Amino acid sequence: MIKNLIIAGGIAAMALTAGSAFAGECSEDQEATAGMLAAGVGKAAVSKVIAVTGKQMVNISSCDFRAGSYIVDFKYNFLAADGLYWVELNAKFDGTGGNATTKVNKASPNMAAAEAKAGVKLASN
């Protein structure tokens, strides 16, 4: 009886450990990869309004990895021809940065002005 309980407990512990490998917060390596991919996703999103011509920076506030996809909340800072812009995004994308869906949660005042000038409102795509 005790032997059966120990075996059952071991199987349950392995199942919990295996489950966490498929879903949950990103590891440091996954977060680094997600940051690089998020830069591309962010650039693709804002390029509908303004061209990114200089350096880019990504600040990740949350990162989850589930079923081969990243779900990331981040701030994307970038340089354009006339200055520094930023947007706060929520994005979901696969392990290559493809199949991205994004939602802009907040944008710098100059980004909002660029959206109005271009006649494009960044939102979910």
Image (tube, rainbow, N blue to C red):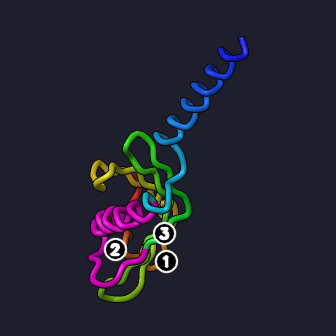
Answer yes or no: do the residues labelled 1 and 3 have beta carbons within 8 Å?
no
Rounded to the nearest angstrom, the CA distance separating label 1 from label 3 is 14 Å
Give the foreground label among 3 and 2.
Answer: 3
Name the residue that disc number 2 marks: 117
Direction from residue 81 to residue 25 in the image, left or right: right
Q: Residue 50 lies in magenta, yes or no?
A: yes
The amino acid type of the residue labelled 2 equals: Lys
Residue extending furthest toward the bottom:
82
Q: Secondary structure at mark 3?
A: strand
Residue 125 in sight here: no
The amino acid type of the residue labelled 3 equals: Lys
Name the residue that disc number 1 marks: 109
Residue extending furthest toward the right:
2
Q: Secondary structure at mark 1?
A: helix
Q: Position of residue 118 (x, y in %)?
A: 30, 70
Which one is in front, 12 or 75?
12
- The magenta-colored residue range is 31-57
Give the foreground label among 2 and 1.
Answer: 1
Rounded to the nearest angstrom, the CA distance separating label 2 from label 1 is 12 Å
